[in-house]
Amino acid sequence: MSTATSCAAARSCAWRYGTTAPSGSWCARATPSPEVVQRKLKSHGRYPYSGITERKDYDWPDGKRLAVYIGFNIEHFEFGAGLGAALGPRNPEPDVLNFSWRDYGNRVGVWRCLELFEALKLPVGAIINTALYDYCPEVVDALVKRGDELIAHGHTNSERQGEMAPDAERALLIECRERIKKESGTAPLGWLSPWISESAVTPDLLAETGYKYTLNWAHDDQPIKFKTKMSGLWSIPYPQELNDIPMIIARQMDARDFADVIVDNFDEMLAQAKAQPLVMGIALHPYIVGQPYRLRHLRRALQHIANSSAVWFTTPGKIWEAVAK
């Protein structure tokens, strides 16, 4: 090898491997490269990778291929403290503007939404703070009367579960489960953390305290069984795109476009479900979609879905029952 060729090779090697070949016949590219050992990324360890096109096929009840549910988040917030979605700039506490905007959902929006669900004969998975029992128990009573599923959602959305110590988190899970059972007659099967805030041990604690599924994870379009210290916890798909808080509040999408997103997502998933059984959730908050101008567009989207006979309209608990049996 000529010196010129060797030097060209050396420059190439220096760029690629961080080494320089000497002049003469020796070339760094002719020698074996050192073994590459990379750091393995930290894993949650809750499930292994599985591509959706490689899984076992099955049907939903009555041979349906697409399961659709509404996750109806009904929340209560502490006045003058804690967390909360904001319509406009946050004010010093007490932030009357944003608190009262959220409270509209429990006083007006929830009832308008329930009228819509009733008209379309759609069941809902009602994701509730247990503080509702202290503030507006009539709302929970109406959900129970309709036969909707009650899903535990912490005590209030003014706090984050993931910031709690394990003993405090365990106590919260037990208290919410027992409160719903005491007030409404049936212990909840499922859990959605306030603000979807988890600690590293939340799935283990959910399984330990008797919950059957979590809605916290948005990683799939099918239910997935989690690995926990005590077996039995499932993850039911819960949407972060078909969700009025990230889309309308965070991304400032208007109601017409949000309704179009629901329709387009439904039509596409209905076609995809011919190959695999899928779950489509729609996450709604009454202080957002219960506003009259947004409700009009939501009605259009839900009417489009309700007109389909190819869909299993259901709740997360029924989905869990179908996969866990």
Image (cartoon, rainbow, N blue to C red):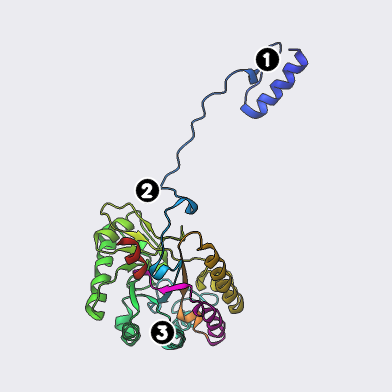
- Quarter of the picture holding the C terminus: bottom left
Q: In which quarter of the image is residue 263?
A: bottom right
Mark-to-mark CA distance, 3 and 1:
77 Å
Indicate the secondary structure of the residue bearing disc 3. Answer: helix
Looking at the image, is mark 2 or mark 3 nearer the viewer? 2
Q: Is the Cβ of the residue at disc 3 closer than 8 Å to that at disc 1? A: no
Mark-to-mark CA distance, 2 and 1:
48 Å
The residue range painted magenta reads: 292-317
Indicate the secondary structure of the residue bearing disc 1. Answer: loop
Name the disc covering residue 126, or none.
none
Q: Mark 3 — residue?
A: 106
- Packing grade of label 1 (10 A; few <14, some 14-19, many >=20) is some
- Report the front residue among 143 and 28: 143
Outermost residue to the top: 24
The picture places residue 111, in percent across and down from the top left corner, at: 42, 88
Please name the amino acid that badge 2 sits on.
Gly
Q: Mark 2 — residue?
A: 45
Mark 2 or 1, nearer chain start: 1
- Packing grade of label 3 (10 A; few <14, some 14-19, many >=20) is many
Q: Is residue 39 above or below residue 232?
A: above
**Number of marks:** 3
The picture places residue 114, in percent across and down from the top left corner, at: 42, 85
Q: Is residue 181 left or right of residue 95?
A: left
The picture places residue 135, in percent across and down from the top left corner, at: 33, 84
Q: Is residue 21 above or below residue 206?
A: above
Q: Quadrant of residue 17?
A: top right
Residue 303 falls inside the magenta stretch: yes
Q: Mark 1 — residue?
A: 22
Please name the amino acid that badge 3 sits on.
Asn
Mark 3 or 1, nearer chain start: 1
Q: Is residue 4 left or right of residue 172?
A: right
